[in-house]
């Protein structure tokens, strides 16, 4: 049913209730002329006369009475449903559909969710972690996170912070195997490699060479499709690996890991948050987006400065 048909039915029902077109127009905040035109339009559309009219009284015809009995309960229920939908939009409860990358992002996302759910315990997070970018609309996503903006049209993408890729190892590993100085020297080292969850394909490492970024295939001593397991292998001194800055930052700052080949560290992407139109968003979605921007926009917890990296590399070279 079109919106204008709902409007004319509302005018009809209110006129029948009040027995006056003028009173109905006043109750619905319409001009008497607009109400009269709408009622006449409804009668033409149905090809029946709905009211007997005199200068003082409007009385329902048999057809009008039947329409009132059939339409009034349905319209009341519809109005209640619409009011409930509007109220739900402003409630801080209900589902919150979130997607994000399986790798690199779990610790970051959990900190956000933990804070948000403590603040709004009636929220029901529904989180899907996938490294591949799905269909934002079909998946009914409220808020998404990706390395790079979403390719979906009509989606707002906001950059949060750079996604660093840092080659790193433990002091124990460096004391035992030395520190790689060139890409060619990596062949002599125990490297870790990450496999795609779905395809099993091994991701290359990335490095800055001259003014460009190259992908560098490696022969690994340790393979995994789980970033946390790869991290544990690196922390145990079994291998060196290229980790995201968000994952490696606390270990680099504590000295548990040391950065390597810093000047060849690539600058290839940023983390983005993406979401639909700012208009008509439920309050719970808007609040989560605001929390995300407040906590993650230019957050240095997950990004190391060049000074930090160079100082760490200097310590690594002293150990090698």
Image (spheres, helix red, strand yellow):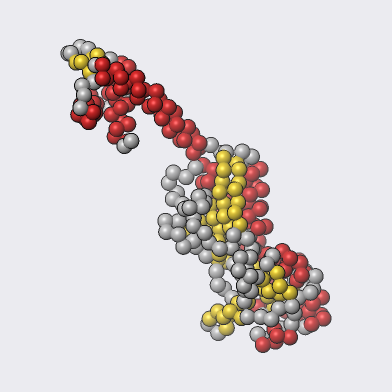
* Horizontal relation, residue 34 to residue 280: left or right: left
Give the percent coordinates (x, y) of residue 262. Answer: 65, 78
Among the 4 quarters of the image, the one containing residue 44: top left
- Which residue is located at x 28 percent, y 15 percent? 19
Is residue 171 visible to the viewer in this orientation of the structure? no
- Which residue is located at x 60 percent, y 69 percent? 199
Q: Is residue 59 above or below residue 77?
A: above
Q: Quadrant of the N terminus?
A: top left
The residue sitting at the bottom extreme is 184
- Which residue is located at x 82 percent, y 81 percent? 176
Give the percent coordinates (x, y) of residue 136. Answer: 49, 55
* Horizontal relation, residue 228 to residue 264: left or right: right
Give the percent coordinates (x, y) of residue 232. Answer: 76, 67
Q: Is residue 159 above or below residue 261?
A: above
The residue sitting at the top extreme is 56
Front residue of this view, candidates 194 and 245: 194
Give the percent coordinates (x, y) of residue 99. Answer: 57, 55
* Horizontal relation, residue 12 to residue 82: left or right: left
Among the 4 quarters of the image, the one containing residue 65: top left
Q: Quadrant of the C terminus?
A: bottom right
């Amino acid at each position: 049913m079109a919106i204008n048909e709902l409007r004319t039915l509302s005018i009809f029902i209110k006129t029948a209730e009040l027995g006056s077109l003028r009173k109905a127009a006043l109750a619905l905040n319409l001009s008497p002329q607009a109400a009269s035109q709408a009622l006449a339009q409804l009668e033409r559309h149905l090809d029946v006369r709905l009211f007997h009219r005199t200068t003082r009284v409007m009385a329902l015809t048999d057809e009008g009475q039947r329409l009132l009995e059939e339409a009034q309960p349905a319209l009341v229920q519809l109005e209640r449903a619409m009011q409930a939908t509007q109220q739900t939009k402003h409630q801080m409860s209900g589902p919150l559909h979130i997607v994000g990358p399986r790798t690199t992002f779990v610790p970051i996302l959990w900190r956000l969710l933990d804070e948000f759910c403590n603040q709004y315990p009636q929220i029901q997070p529904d989180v899907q972690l996938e490294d591949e970018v799905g269909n934002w609309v079909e998946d009914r996503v409220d808020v998404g996170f990706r390395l790079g903006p979403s390719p979906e049209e009509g989606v707002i993408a906001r950059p949060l912070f750079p996604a660093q890729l840092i080659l790193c190892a433990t002091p124990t590993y460096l004391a035992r195997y030395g520190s790689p100085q060139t890409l060619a020297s990596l062949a002599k080292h125990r490297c870790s490699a990450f496999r795609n969850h779905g395809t099993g394909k091994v991701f290359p490492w990335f490095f800055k060479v001259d003014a460009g970024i190259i992908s560098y295939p490696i022969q690994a001593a340790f393979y995994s499709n789980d970033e946390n397991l790869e991290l544990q292998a690196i922390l145990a001194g079994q291998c060196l690996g290229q980790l995201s800055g968000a994952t490696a930052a606390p270990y680099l700052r504590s000295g548990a890991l040391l950065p390597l080949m810093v000047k060849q560290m690539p600058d290839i992407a940023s983390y983005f948050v993406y979401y639909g139109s700012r208009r008509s968003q439920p309050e719970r979605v808007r609040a989560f987006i605001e929390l995300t921007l407040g906590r993650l926009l230019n957050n240095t917890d997950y990004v190391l400065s060049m000074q930090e990296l160079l100082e760490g590399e200097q310590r690594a070279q002293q150990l090698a």
